[in-house]
Image (cartoon, rainbow, N blue to C red):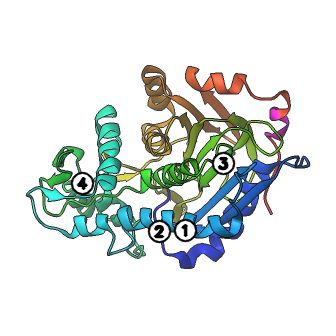
Amino acid sequence: MTHFVRASVWRAVRSLLIVPLLLTLSGCAERTDPMIELSGPTMGTYYSVKIARPPAGLNAETLEPELIRVLDGVIAEISTYDPNSELSRLNANPSTDWIPVSANLLAVLAEGQRIAELTNGVYDVTIGPLVNLWGFGPERRPDRLPTEAEIQAARERVGYRKLEWRDSPPAVRKARGDLYIDLSSLGEGYGADRIVDWLESRGVSDYMVAIAGAIRAKGLNDKGQPWGIAIEQPLPDQRAVHRVVPVSGHALSTSGDYRNFFEKDGKRYSHEIDPMTGAPVDRKLGSVTVIGNAGMVVDGLATALMVLGEERGPAFAEIQGIAAYFIVREGEDFKGIASTAFQAYLDTAAPDSDSAQKTNTEH
């Protein structure tokens, strides 16, 4: 889950995120078919779009402004960093009556509420007060850790059952006027879905779309093979591939504790916050990767499984039939745990995929 931040962080993010990931996804083999590749800043992170065998009339020059338009539209709907976004205006509205919202915003909220119900509140889109309290929201991070009293006060404003929604007409109702909704854990996947919608409306059938850890891929790459998506080792100071998964016609999202965190008095505090405790999760679980049909769905599920942890998470994924892959720290080593549904993707991996597991893509 990456929170939407100002574009001014892009220069730092670019060198850390974009170059290694593109190398991992592209590989080193020579290309055989035409390819359009575009990347740039969005939502405080980056987007990357690759189109193999583009339809006639589609090129990088005409595509880039359209991608930016789509992504800017997503930010205008669900960003908590833009005070003028629809979500920010909803959060600022103190009313406890029905508040009209757009169909797009409602779709994201409804998916968040579905995952919240599924996990009995382990995942919660009303977690915004705790996100902000711990310094992972739009506000500047304080120099001290929050007190127990501050955590308890924030927790009183959190609870997915405090938020109702209806389809017709689209509207939401807050049980408390100070409810603060944070959709960052769905945002990257939602953005990828919106780009895919635009591409497919233009006849694109072979593509890979990534917004940070949320990826949609369909068809074949420029070498005529399924898109190879790298799952990283959960290491904060380097880029190393844990394994590569072939993805075509699906969405993939990874959530982890190794990129967005801060340290205080020798302890690391992750942006993954447990609404039950009001504090960042403290687990051996380094990352969770989920594969499914929609970016927004797998994005939210990956966050939920991270909060559930290395014991409850795999059990939950198995019961629910979720294709999930967990990387658990064991001292200096890592152990991968695949749900039955995820193992099916690993079984289709090319024989040489394992050779990429230890490839260091740090630059």
Q: Is the magenta stretch mostly helix, strand or loop?
A: helix
What is the crowding at mark 2: few (fewer than 14 residues within 10 Å), some, or many (at least 20)?
some
Q: Do the residues labelled 1 and 2 touch (CB within 8 Å)?
A: yes
Provide the secondary structure element on which disc 4 rests: helix
Q: Are the residues at dot 1 and dot 4 in contact (C-beta closer than 8 Å)?
A: no
Q: Residue furthest right?
A: 30
Which label sits on residue 155? 4
Instruction: Using the image, tell me which numbered label, if any, was put on residue 208.
Output: 3
Kindly tell me whether residue 10 is visible in this rendering: yes
Mark 2, residue position: 72
Q: Which of 82 and 360 is in front in this view?
A: 82
Residues shaded magenta: 353-357
Depicted 36 relative to depicted 27: above or below: below
How far apart in space, not on screen, are marks 4 and 2 (Cα)? 31 Å
Q: Tell me the amino acid under the disc marked 3.
A: Met
At label 1, the amino acid type is: Ile
Which of the two discs, 1 and 4, labels the residue nearer the N terminus? 1
* Among the two numbered marks 3 and 2 on one chain, the one whose residue lies closer to the N terminus: 2
